[in-house]
Amino acid sequence: MSGGHQIVLVDGLSETEEVLKAVFEPKGTRIARIRHLNTAKFFEPDSRPNVVVLHESDAQPAHPELECFESIPRVVIRSVLQTEDSESSDSETFYLQKPFQYPELVRAVERLLEQGC
C-alpha cells in the first residue's frame, strides 16, 4: 500500500478519526472527517477519496447525499447488520456492526486501499 491516499470519515466518533490518523497518516494517507456532506470538493479527480468510512446512526440509517461516493470503496458501520449486508458480494463495501473493534476497521480499510492500488 503506497501513500498519497485519502480516507474520508463521515460522522462517527473523534476516536475513530484519531485511530485512522495514527495508523494511516504515517504512511502518507490523508484523513478527512466531515459531519455534513458538502461534496463539491470531492468531484475533482485529485481530491476524491480512496475510501469512505461511514458511521450510520439509528436516527439516520442512510445518507442519500452519498451518491457522489457511489463508486468509491467504503466501510459502513451500523448498529444492526442487515441480512443483505452479510450476504453482499460487493467487495467494495465492508460492513461492521457497532460496537466494533478498531483493528477490524483498520483491516477493512487496508484491504480496500490495497484493492484500489
Image (cartoon, rainbow, N blue to C red):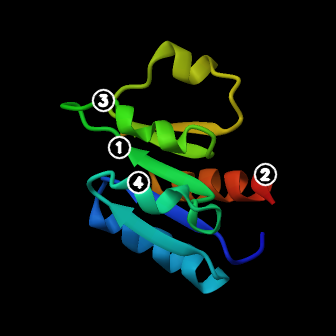
List the residue tagged with mark 1. 99
- Helix, strand or loop at disc 2? helix
In three-dimensional space, the C-alpha distance between marks 2 and 3, rounded to whole angstroms, equals 27 Å
Q: Quadrant of the N terminus?
A: bottom right
List the residue tagged with mark 3. 61
Q: Amino acid at mark 1?
A: Pro
Seen at 67% across and 59% down, the residue is 110
Comparing marks 2 and 1, which lies closer to the viewer?
A: 2
In three-dimensional space, the C-alpha distance between marks 1 and 3, rounded to whole angstroms, equals 16 Å
Tags 1 and 4 touching, CB below 8 Å: no
Q: Residues within 10 Å of mark 2 (few under 14, many from 20)?
A: few
List the residue tagged with mark 2. 115
Counting residues from the start of the chain, the first of labels 2 and 3 encountered is 3
Q: Amino acid at mark 3?
A: Pro
Tags 1 and 3 touching, CB below 8 Å: no
Give the percent coordinates (x, y) of residue 92. 67, 39
List the residue tagged with mark 4. 39
Give the percent coordinates (x, y) of residue 9. 42, 58
